[in-house]
Image: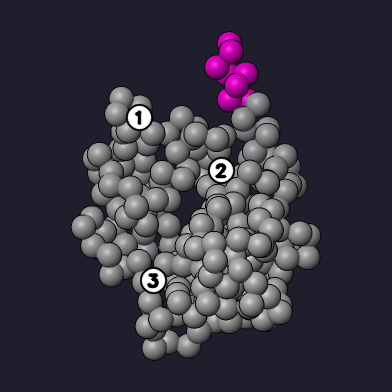
Amino acid sequence: MIEIKNLHKKFGKLEVLNNINLSFNKGECIALIGPNGCGKTTLIKSILGMVIPSKGDVLFDQKSILKKFQYREKIGYMPQIGRYPDYMKVGQIIDMIKQIRNSTQDLDEELVKAFELEKIFDKQMRTLSGGTTQKVSATLAFLFNPEVLILDEPTAGLDPLASEILKEKIIREKEKGKLILITSHLLSELDDMITQIIYMQEGEVHFHKTIADLLETTGEEKISKAIAKILKNKSNEQNH
């Protein structure tokens, strides 16, 4: 579905991605984790065509995405912080995106209902809290029923109920055979959702494992504890 081959990205002299090789398939929910500045967002933006790699390629359905844009119609993207015109109302934003996409397919408005966004259709974007803006971003990501969902820190800023609604939605979409990529700092959030995990540090992939493999090799029951154990072992190795 998506293949990343020998991907490098430099901003000036700073190497943000160093020889990344990964492949993602349908029906997987993959968490991309790592400390701030490890290259997660640059990797996501490379897949979206928002960052042009210095070297290497990204393939979508076996075709290079470089200098193409059509493939993006198959991706729903939820940015970490959504930026919208201040004075537009919530309902206007949703209508505008529908018109821009001009899509003939059935829309997925499940989150509009689940988040009760109809009640705030008349509110201007600038009056919304960060969490409510996140609900709008999540709704737009799922709206066109995309084959691939890329969610950057999706539950950050959401209240516990909204967070649960979104997590259940992610699980249902994965079960329909969609590919879902999630970046997250909140490892405890990921336990029920993800099938694979990629840990990045300083622009490199440190490991890419299935959850079953991760838990088995560490002897832990929780993803967060398993990752902590691997990282502790790595840091002990480096210090010896």
238 falls in the magenta region: yes
Label 3 environment density (alpha carbons within 10 Å; few <14, some 14–19, many ≥20): some
**C-alpha separation, residue under disc 3 versus residue under disc 1:** 29 Å
Q: Please report contact status of discs 3 and 1: CB closer than 8 Å, yes or no.
A: no
Label 2 environment density (alpha carbons within 10 Å; few <14, some 14–19, many ≥20): many
Residue for badge 2: 33
Residue furthest out toward the top: 240
Magenta residues span: 233-240
- The colour scheme used here is one colour
- The residue depicted at 23 percent of the width and 55 percent of the height is 66
Q: Name which residue type carries label 3.
A: Lys
Q: Name which residue type carries label 1.
A: Glu
Residue furthest out toward the front: 87
Which quadrant, please, contains the C terminus?
top right
Residue 176, quarter of picture: bottom right
Residue for badge 3: 74
Q: Is residue 168 left or right of residue 45?
A: right
Q: Name which residue type carries label 2.
A: Ile
**C-alpha separation, residue under disc 2 versus residue under disc 3:** 23 Å
Q: Is residue 190 above or below residue 71?
A: above
Is residue 39 visible in this depiction of the protein?
yes
**C-alpha separation, residue under disc 2 versus residue under disc 1:** 18 Å
Element under disc 1 = strand
Residue 5 locus on image (x, y percent): 30, 47
Residue for badge 1: 15
